Image (tube, helix red, strand yellow):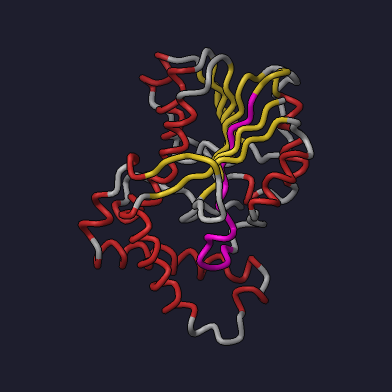
């Protein structure tokens, strides 16, 4: 049975505001690019659908969990939702999609090559993949919910296996965001200092997932309680997307078929 975890960010929890706004900048950027038939892989809490559906002629959503879509949104837009594990992209025709949007998903996929192969298959010639995933070099600890994370070189390489035109951009935070990042870094160090045998990298992922999830939520809430004005004040405008460097928080990749 699949477990919903702290990996699914929500605007309903104030302690997640900083990470939520970090996710939202990707959707704001995607809104400037998409049109036609759009496939979103990994709809999560559904806020991406609310942001993007109005820019699409047809919007297809896919997630392994149910995603809430309001009746109003369904009425005003042509939206189809499929609950399924991916890959493969079942019931999605080859050469039928103008844009694939998949944010904070590929790091959870066991076979990332098959995942990208399927995306390439369903995209029309000239269609675009918009993808985000964390920058491994900026991660503060091992995330056992992630199969893998990518360095900048690894990110470009895996996309280039399937797409000839790959533009790896980055999500960056301003001073306010990076101040939160540094406080988070200090907090994580306080937790991991007890891991003197480096178990976080030695134990299998399944053994670490639930403890990580609990500690992650507690850490975010403590950061919120100790830095309330800072956490509350972060807005989507405090993030930007530009050419990637080793210091970007996430990659924002545009790959064209």
Q: Where is residue 37 in the image (x, y as percent from the top left)?
A: 58, 17
Q: Position of residue 80 (x, y in %)?
A: 55, 22
Horizontal arrangement in the rendering, residue 181 relative to residue 95 (left or right): left
Total labels drawn: 0
- Against 198, residue 12 (above or below) is above
Task: Give 102 or 34, whichever is nearer the viewer.
Answer: 34
Q: Position of residue 233 (x, y in %)?
A: 24, 49
Horizontal arrangement in the rendering, residue 142 relative to residue 6 (left or right): right
Image: magenta residue range: 128-143
Task: Give 220 or 170, whichever is nearer the viewer.
Answer: 170
Task: Give 79 or 242, whichever is nearer the viewer.
Answer: 242
- The residue sitting at 63% across, 56% down in the picture is 149
Residue 86 sits in quarter: top right
- The residue sitting at 58% across, 70% down in the picture is 208
- Against 134, residue 185 (above or below) is below
The answer to whether residue 216 is magenta is no
Q: Where is residue 16 in the image (x, y as percent from the top left)?
A: 36, 53
The answer to whether residue 137 is magenta is yes
Q: Quarter holding the C terminus?
A: top right
Q: Which residue lies furthest to the left in this view?
A: 229
Residue 239 sits in quarter: top left
Residue 87 sits in quarter: top right
- The residue sitting at 47% across, 39% down in the picture is 241
């Amino acid at each position: 049975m699949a477990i919903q975890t702290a990996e699914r960010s929500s605007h309903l929890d104030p302690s997640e505001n900083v990470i939520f706004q970090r996710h939202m900048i990707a959707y704001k950027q995607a809104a400037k690019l998409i049109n036609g038939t759009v496939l979103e892989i990994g709809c999560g809490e559904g806020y991406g659908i609310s942001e993007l559906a109005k820019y699409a002629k047809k919007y297809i959503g896919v997630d392994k969990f149910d995603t809430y879509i309001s009746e109003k949104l369904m009425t005003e837009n042509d939206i189809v939702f499929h609950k399924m594990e991916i890959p493969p992209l079942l019931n999605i025709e080859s050469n039928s999609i103008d844009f694939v949007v998949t944010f904070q998903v590929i790091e959870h996929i066991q076979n990332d090559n098959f995942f990208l192969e399927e995306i390439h298959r369903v995209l029309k010639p000239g269609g675009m993949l918009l993808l985000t995933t964390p920058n491994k070099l900026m991660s503060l600890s091992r995330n056992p919910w992630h199969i893998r994370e990518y360095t900048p070189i690894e990110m470009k390489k895996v996309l280039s296996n399937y797409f000839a035109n790959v533009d790896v951009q980055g999500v960056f935070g301003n001073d306010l965001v990076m101040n939160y990042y540094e406080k988070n870094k200090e907090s994580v160090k306080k937790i991991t200092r007890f891991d003197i045998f480096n178990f976080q990298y030695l134990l299998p992922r399944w053994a670490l997932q639930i403890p990580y999830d609990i500690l992650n939520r507690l850490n975010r809430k403590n950061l919120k309680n100790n830095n309330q004005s800072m956490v509350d004040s972060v807005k989507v405008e405090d993030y930007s997307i530009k050419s990637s460097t080793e210091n970007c928080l996430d990659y924002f990749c545009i790959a064209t078929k």
